[in-house]
Amino acid sequence: MAGCSEFDLIDRYLARLGAGRDDVVLGPGDDAAITRGGGKPLLMALDTLVEGVHFPVDLPAEWIGYRALAVNLSDIAAMGGEPCWALLGLTLPAPDEAWVAPFAEGLGRLARAFGVAVIGGDVTRGPLTVSLQITGRATGPALRRDGASVGDRVWISGRPGEAAAGLGVWQQGDAREQARWQGLRQAFIAPRPRVALGQALAGVASAAIDLSDGLAADAGHIAARSGVALHLDPSCCRPSARLLRWAGEAGAYRLQLGGGDDYELCFTAPAEADAAVRAAARRARSPVRCIGEVGDGEGIWWGDHRIGEAAAGYRHFSV
């Protein structure tokens, strides 16, 4: 069907494949699936990175390896889990050891930092593509997208919008500009998965998602799955000072809402849990801020205006 999104394809054709097993707690539609694994529930997620789509063609292999795992760690973080094992699918135009060695170093360094074992996978020939499947364990009640309730507060971690600006800095290619905006560039190249924050929020937050496609689009998934509206307060969503300097006020808000690639967490929590949220953030050493509240209705609201789907983040198959 022409004009459908990746989410339409998943929902119509891929979300209910195979046997209906009673050890599947949660299937497609969240940051990770949940299955029963004998002890703690298992969390499973997979992401694919394609050259020229998910990373620039001139990005060094070390950082491609790092990002391939970071985006998966962020999915486990959004479920409040502990990442444990990974499978790697690597498609290469040619068996280039000079490329594979730094790729493996970047991936392996981050895997060691988070206690992840890469336990298998496949290498084949074709356009440069990296697929990584990660499995983790729930450390408490798994965070999901469908738990937000009217009256909850909406929170974010970190500085959404900086990664999209960092991609712009990288694409400029000017060495002096790269050095001047190094912080923005690093936000894109080396995102920091909020695994510790997700674990600290288990049992505190009511719903959560990681910010891969932009704040408006990803918060919209919480709204849709929970059957509520998320009202964002522009005065609480002010972008970082360096993002404002780089993009200007209008551009900074546009990148914050629709830029993507932040891999921060957006989550909701009851109003009476404010102190617990802040205590969790301190334990995880992750900056968080309240940016709005959950209300009746549907969709994402920016002040008095509803954000339309066309403006709400990245879509793979949009024209």
Image: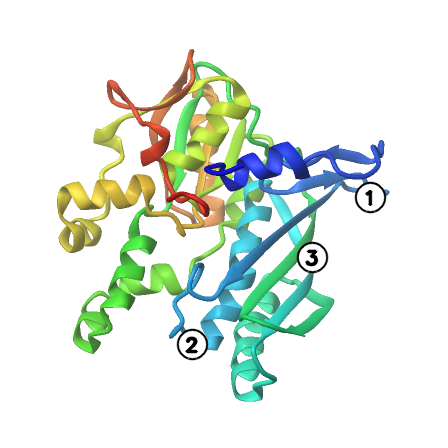
Q: Tag 3's secondary structure?
A: strand
Q: Are marks 3 and 1 in contact (CB under 8 Å)?
A: no
Q: Residue furthest front?
A: 2
Which residue position is annotated with label 1?
Answer: 37
Rendered image quadrant of residue 278: top left
Q: Distance from label 3 to label 1 (Cα)?
A: 13 Å
Which residue position is annotated with label 3?
Answer: 84
Left or right, residue 94 beside residue 284: right
Task: Please determine whether, in this image, residue 155 is positioned above or below residue 64.
Answer: above
Which residue position is annotated with label 2?
Answer: 60
Residue 235 coordinates in the image, percent (x, y): 21, 30
Residue displayed at 55% across by 72% down? 109
Q: Earlier in the sequence, mark 2 or mark 1?
A: 1
Task: Please determine whether, in this image, residue 203 is positioned above or below residue 126.
Answer: above
Q: Distance from label 3 to label 2 (Cα)?
A: 26 Å
Left or right, residue 309 beside residue 197: left
- Depth check, mark 2 against mark 1: the one in front is 2
Left or right, residue 186 beside residue 121: left
Nearest to the observer: residue 271 or residue 117: 117
Of the 4 image quadrants, the one containing the C terminus is top left
Q: Tag 1's secondary structure?
A: loop
Q: Amino acid at mark 1?
A: Gly
Rendered image quadrant of residue 10: top right
Nearest to the observer: residue 227 or residue 112: 227
Q: Are marks 2 and 1 in contact (CB under 8 Å)?
A: no
Nearest to the observer: residue 194 or residue 262: 262
Q: Amino acid at mark 3?
A: Cys
Q: Amino acid at mark 2?
A: Pro
- Depth check, mark 3 against mark 2: the one in front is 2
Residue 85 coordinates in the image, percent (x, y): 71, 59
Q: Tag 2's secondary structure?
A: loop
As drawn, the label of residue 112 is none
